[in-house]
Amino acid sequence: MLNLKCLVESNSLKSIPSSYICFNKNEENDFMLIDETNDIPTIDFSQLISSDLNARSVAIQKLGDACRDWGFFMLINHGVSETLKDEVIKGSQCFFDLSNEDKKEYIGEKLFDPIRCGTSFNLKVDKTLYWRDYLKCYVHPQFHVPNKPIAFSETLEEYVTKSRELIGELLKGISVSLGLEENYIQKTMNVDMGSQLLVINYYPPCPKPELVMGLPAHTDHGLLTLLMQNELCGLQIEHNGKWIPVNPLPNSFLINTGDHLEILTNGKYKSVVHRALVMNKKAARISVGTAHGPTLDTIVTPAPELLSKDSPSIYRGITYKDYLQLQQSRELERKSCLDCIRI
Ligand SMILES: O=C(O)CCC(=O)C(=O)O
Ligand SMILES: [Fe+2]
């Protein structure tokens, strides 16, 4: 199977294969790239769970504003240790360093394979290949991860459990920010038994990074994605028609809203468009995301409580599973899959 890391390390890579050259990369030049990184909202998790009701309510307000205006924020004071995050990154590097023989059993094309590794986005539909290898694992409600490298499974189990706890608290805050009961999203979306997909992205070094794309502009499925990365940057988010580079604060998590939060809120909280550039000629960038969604059979529709005569439903209901299938069958592109279910 195609494995970009192997290709890059084989020394045979004198020039970028034409299949990777992203010709339309700058077609979106109307998007001026500017550095408004410092404006990206920051949410203090400790305030969100504070027993001081006033502090909590201020944090919830900030959280709602961040979801409405950006669909993206950095989460600080979240209580997850740097050691655990480092172990996840190190384990990820070791996983991608395994031999092809060791990884063979995880190679797959099927969307609902519990564990699958591959390259680009979806080889069946990609017109251009993306400069990225990946490992995807369904880690909830059943926990599936590779049994190699040693101890990676334990590290990941601890990490994805912590990430679910953080997302649970964020969803409470988001429910309240919408004027809904605290457990509204968790209950209606069956989040306790919901799907959690771990995605580890490996962007190998590239001799001509300006010619390739790690992941093109897209939105994520699910309610919220929690993301972290090694020391290399590359993520950009779309905000007010501009690409904003993300330079994470030390020890922060990056959180973005997903398509299903947009559906549930009837467009009030938009799913943020983002992309990953490749910027490094010498080192690999690793990012680790967990996408948190409802159970696969949950039909997601706009919350009736948020609808009115003036604000009728703009999305038709669809099960999470059908939505994932729809998304996977299409080329990853700027226009999000939400367009398929817009009324
Ligand atoms: O690598 C990144 O920073 C972003 C990854 C991403 O957008 C994804 O896995 O959906
Ligand atoms: Fe994404």
Image (spheres, rainbow, N blue to C red):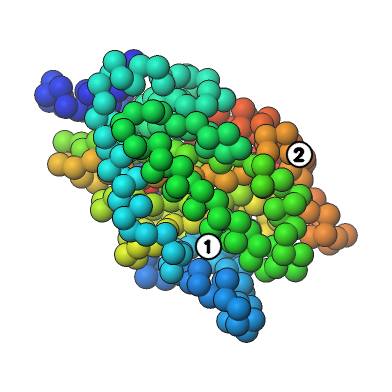
- Amino acid type of disc 1? Trp
- Quarter that holds the N terminus: top left
Residue 328, visible in the rendered structure = yes
Which residue sits at x=72%, y=59%? Answer: 183
Which residue sits at x=61%, y=32%? Answer: 324
Q: Is mark 2 within 8 Å of ligand 2?
A: no
Which is nearer the eye, 322 or 30?
322
The residue carrying mark 1 is 70
Which residue sits at x=67%, y=47%? Answer: 191
Mark 2 or mark 1: name the one nearer the start of the chain.
1
311 relative to 331, above or below: below
In x, y percent, where is residue 294?
67, 43
Which residue sits at x=66%, y=31%? Answer: 321
> On the picture, is 43 further left or further right than 265?
left
Q: Is mark 1 within 8 Å of ligand 2?
A: no
147 relative to 277, above or below: above
In x, y percent, where is residue 55?
58, 81
Q: Callout 2 environment at 10 Å: few (<14), some (14 to 19), or many (20+)?
A: some
The residue carrying mark 2 is 299
- Amino acid type of disc 2? Ile
The tag on residue 300 is none
> On the picture, is 184 further left or further right than 83?
right
110 relative to 140, above or below: above
* CA distance separating discs 2 and 1: 26 Å
Instruction: Name which quarter of the figure residue 129 lies in.
Output: top left
Q: Find numbered disc 2 in the image and state the secondary structure of the residue it sits on.
A: strand
